[in-house]
């Protein structure tokens, strides 16, 4: 019988995805033998080149406070989003793809490590050297990771992730879609707590005959 796939559309610099981190981790652990969870980098703000305006910064921090209050995930607000910061999510997404080229088992760990570095530690995860530090912390070879990060192949694969999300009409993160064969069911468009999602997932798996 074909194993179902749970497509997880997310971005490492999406605050609600950071809030959702314990939920998706629990889902992955609880269904490790029966469900494949596949990460798709959705592309929250890829290729942004301008700095945030003061108004944009305050809007983003407002969302961060909402996520913190609802989920209990840690955020570092002091010094967050400094004046010259460019909120380009492409490098962090590309880092996850690059890690997949070196060690597929480290894809989710690096994704979570980038989230924690950005939100809880206030590190600039748009910088290659910071991303390389995080990859090295997961036992990746630093030079090999940087080579992969800057390669045309990884840039193309990252763009393909973004295109898949756009093609399927995924406009927000996190989004979860359960697929088995040619049948699929959307489980979440945005944050959902674990208990609620577990019930929805069980229902969907039964409906799809998984």
Image (cartoon, rainbow, N blue to C red):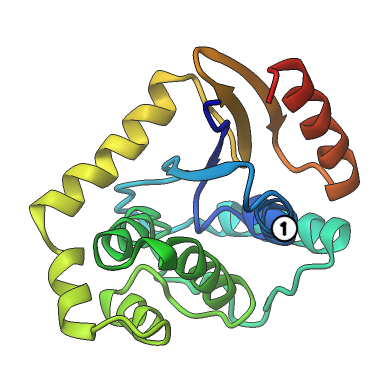
Q: Nearer the viewer, residue 1 or 94?
A: 1
Q: Is residue 187 positioned above or below 65 on the image?
A: above
Residue that numbered label 1 is attached to: 19
Q: Nearer the viewer, residue 88 or 173?
A: 173
Q: Is residue 59 visible?
A: no
Q: Is residue 184 visible?
A: yes
Q: Quadrant of the N terminus?
A: top right
Residue drawn where x is 36% and y is 85% of the image: 139
Q: Quadrant of residue 119?
A: bottom right
Report the side of 126 relative to 16 (left or right).
Answer: left
Residue lying at the far front in this picture: please name it.
1
Q: Is residue 204 positioned above or below 147 on the image?
A: above
Q: Which percent across, then down, holds residue 103? A: 32, 67
Q: Quadrant of residue 188?
A: top right
Determine the secondary structure under disc 1.
helix
Q: Nearer the viewer, residue 112 or 172?
A: 112
Q: Nearer the viewer, residue 103 or 63?
A: 103
Report the side of 134 relative to 196 (left or right).
Answer: left
Q: Is residue 76 positioned above or below 126 on the image?
A: below
Residue drawn where x is 77% and y is 56% of the image: 67
Residue lying at the far top in this picture: please name it.
182
Residue drawn where x is 16% and y is 83% of the image: 143
């Amino acid at each position: 019988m074909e194993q179902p796939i749970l497509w997880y559309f997310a971005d490492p610099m999406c605050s609600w995805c950071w809030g959702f981190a314990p939920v998706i981790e629990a889902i992955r652990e609880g269904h490790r033998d029966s469900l494949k969870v596949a990460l798709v980098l959705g592309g929250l703000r890829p290729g942004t080149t301008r700095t945030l305006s003061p108004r944009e910064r305050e809007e983003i921090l407002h969302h961060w406070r909402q996520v913190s209050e609802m989920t209990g995930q840690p955020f570092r607000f002091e010094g967050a989003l400094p004046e010259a910061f460019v909120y380009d999510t492409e490098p962090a997404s590309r880092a996850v793809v690059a890690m997949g080229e070196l060690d597929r088992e480290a894809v989710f760990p690096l994704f979570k490590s980038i989230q924690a570095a950005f939100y809880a530690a206030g590190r600039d995860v748009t910088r290659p050297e910071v991303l390389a530090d995080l990859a090295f912390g997961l036992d990746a070879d630093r030079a090999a990771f940087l080579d992969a990060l800057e390669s045309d192949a990884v840039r193309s694969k990252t763009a393909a992730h973004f295109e898949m999300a756009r093609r399927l009409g995924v406009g927000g993160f996190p989004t979860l879609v359960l697929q088995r064969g040619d049948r699929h069911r959307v489980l979440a468009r945005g944050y959902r707590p674990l208990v609620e999602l577990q019930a929805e997932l069980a229902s969907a798996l039964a409906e799809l005959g998984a």
